[in-house]
Amino acid sequence: MIIATPKLLKSSLVVVFTTLVALLFLARAGVWLLVSDQVPARLDTVFTFAGEAARVRYSRELVEKNVRAHWLLSDYEDGYARLLKLDGFTMDRVTAVDTCTNTYSEVRALQSFLNTSTWLGIRQPPNPLKVGLVSSPYHMRRIKIMIERTINDDSIEFYYLPVPLERYSLDAEMYREWWRYENVGSTVILELMKIFYFWLIS
């Protein structure tokens, strides 16, 4: 017969509580990943995280609506930049970066770009500087965590502008019940693992 000592009871309650919190978090994990801001009336620069054509297309729309905005494009071996040129897009407001190997290196590249005083060819950047960040919806929470841990500048306002879910034939309900959809479920699990890994190494 096992007698529940106060210490054993306390340990059991901690385990139960921790398990419940973890389960509640997992139940909301899909929605938690989705960080999205309203597109502001003005953007001074747009940063596109590499990975897929949908991000480039959406960024292009934002840049075309903001005629003074500079576009910083994370690219692989000049792939999308080359396609933009072939499509007749004017590249004088585009800076392509093809040296990044992961999301954190992209955030650091953005930081370096924003710290360059002549980033837009003008002496005095707007204050606040409005920066739109474009990636896939599931990717935005990790980007937000990295931005907040890396770039601390009150003169910069970041806007998290994921490609709309419907462009992937997805909706918010699929992320609310992510475990019911194989493609969404695998994405959520992988993204949570990447966020956890970043927390560990940072």
Image (cartoon, grey):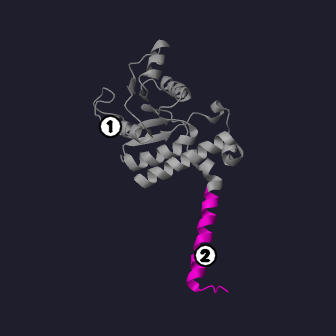
Q: Residue at x 63, y 70 (%)?
A: 16
- Residue pushed farthest front? 1
Is residue 22 on the magenta stretch?
yes
Q: Position of residue 71 (x, y in %)?
A: 42, 27
- At numbered mark 1, what does the secondary structure look like: helix, strand or loop? helix
- Residue pushed farthest right? 180
Q: Residue at x 40, y 50 (%)?
A: 149
- Identify residue type, mark 2: Ser
Q: Nearer the viewer, mark 2 or mark 1?
A: 2
- At numbered mark 2, what does the secondary structure look like: helix, strand or loop? helix
- Identify residue type, mark 1: Ser
Say few, some or many: other residues with alpha carbon within 10 Å of mark 1 (under 14 / 14 to 19 / 20 or more). few
Q: Residue at x 45, y 31 (%)?
A: 46
Is residue 85 on the magenta stretch?
no
The residue at which mark 1 appears reads as 112
Say few, some or many: other residues with alpha carbon within 10 Å of mark 2 (under 14 / 14 to 19 / 20 or more). few
Q: Nearer the viewer, residue 189 or 138?
A: 189
The residue at which mark 2 appears reads as 12
Q: Residue at x 44, y 39 (%)?
A: 103
Q: Position of residue 51 (x, y in %)?
A: 50, 31
Q: Quadrant of residue 119?
A: top left
- Tell me: 144 left or right of 22: left
In the rendered structure, are the residues bearing label 2 and label 1 in contact, judged by CB atoms less than 8 Å apart?
no
Q: Which residues are magenta?
A: 1-25
